[in-house]
Image: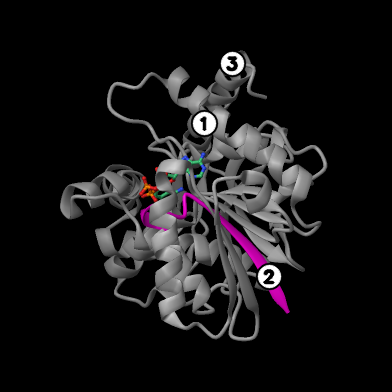
Amino acid sequence: MTTTITITGAGGQIGYALLFRIAAGDLLGPDERVRLKLLEIPQGLRGAEGAALELQDGAFGLLESVDVTDDAGVAFDGTNIAFLVGSRPRTAGMERGDLLAANGGIFGPQGQALNAGAADDVRIVVVGNPANTNALIAAAHAPDIPSERFTALTRLDHNRAVGQLSTLLGVPASEVRDVTIWGNHSATQFPDVAHATVGGRGVPELLAERFGGEVAARAWLADEFIPRVAKRGAEIIEVRGSSSVASAANAAIDHVRDWVHGTQNGWTSVALPSDGSYDVPAGLVSSFPARSVDGAWQIVRDLDLDDFAAPRIAASVAELVEEREAVRTLGLL
Ligand code: NAI
């Protein structure tokens, strides 16, 4: 079997990290051949062409072909999996309206091109920021693609939360289950450990043991854990001198691999169009706890949200509602 995979922004940093993982079989496994289509804007084409040369030099057994183009129609034709990485992220002094308008100019046409040419089973993950609202815009321009095929990446936030717990509690990351990122992939996100477990024991109980009571554990969550996870991107920039790249590509691989092959080890976090669950307005692309069953995401339902969680989720969802209103006002939906 061969899967056609499109990567936008393929000449950039995350694209560079993604391509080699995919070609090596980390996304779909050792039996699935891949065709790569790299989409760039004209000024990014040389970067993507260079990456294509290096892919050739990797002599990957699973890699059937690599095409580089600046034409979205060509890039999305027949695509089964689309990583939408290229975007116009916020830069210093940029107004929100300008940011959203610039991204509307990217994700509206890309949604249309996906609608026109993608394979019937297409799965889309938006990595480029503001990821949730970019996914919303793309979905709105692709009326023939079921909206739940448009997702945005909060798996990096999820993995960051798991990594923090694993280090604190001294257990392998694979033993930390059922963490949730709620809301927007932004500083308002809510990393939630209320239902998380390690080795069958509740994380809240383990934290209370560790910090000497529930009150101290909650203070650690509010003052240390949540801001550390939500602002980890800024920490990486400060320490590394450049934004998260390999961890972002890794998370994008995790997201799509679980979507295609099914979630292992509990649930994960995915930003996808709300079906109204947990009072998140229908259609809003918001992060939820989700499992992939038979190749489709299913939101984990009926979790109890206490007075620690509910207002934090509501605050992040309110930010998404504002972003949606802003793009509506700009005529981008
Ligand atoms: P980068 O600047 O190295 O690469 C972006 C590439 O996208 C550039 O080569 C640029 O030419 C290309 N591009 C811009 N507009 C395009 C368009 N319309 N079509 C095709 N390509 C286009 O940036 P990097 O580090 O690769 O990050 C990419 C995006 O991912 C950024 O928006 C960043 O904020 C976001 N990001 C999201 C994360 C998440 O967890 N959701 C984590 C880390 C980064």
Would residue 98 be visible to someone looking at this image?
yes
- First along the sequence among labels 2 and 1: 2
Q: What residue type is labelled 3?
A: Leu
- Residue visible at 71% across and 33% down? 140
Q: How far apart are marks 3 and 1 (CA)?
A: 11 Å
Mark 3 to mark 2 CA distance (whole Å): 36 Å
Residue placed at 18% from the left, 47% from the top?
Answer: 238
Q: Which of 217 and 2 is in front in this view?
A: 2
Q: What stretch is highlighted in magenta?
A: 1-15
Residue 3's tag is 2
Q: Where is residue 7 in the image (x, y as percent from the top left)?
A: 54, 56
As drawn, the residue found furthest toward the top would be 329
Q: Where does the image place residue 244, in percent across and percent down from the top left?
A: 32, 54
Badge 2 amino acid: Thr
Chain-order first, disc 3 or disc 1: 1
Image quadrant for the C terminus? Answer: top right
The residue carrying pointer 1 sits among few (fewer than 14), some (14 to 19) or many (20 or more) residues within 10 Å by Cα, namely many
In the depicted view, which residue is nearer to us: 327 or 13? 13
Q: Position of residue 175 (x, y in %)?
A: 45, 76
Res. 330 mark:
3
Is residue 12 on the magenta stretch? yes
Q: In this view, does 186 lie above or below 85?
A: above
In this rendering, would 312 be left or right of 272?
Answer: left
Front-most of residues 116 and 236: 116
Residue for point 62% across, 45% down? 72
Look at label 1 and name its amino acid. Asn
How crowded is the residue under tag 2: few (<14 C-alpha within 10 Å), some, or many (20+)?
Answer: some
Q: Which residue is drawn at 68% across and 31% down?
A: 281
Vertical position of residue 258 compared to residue 60: above or below = above
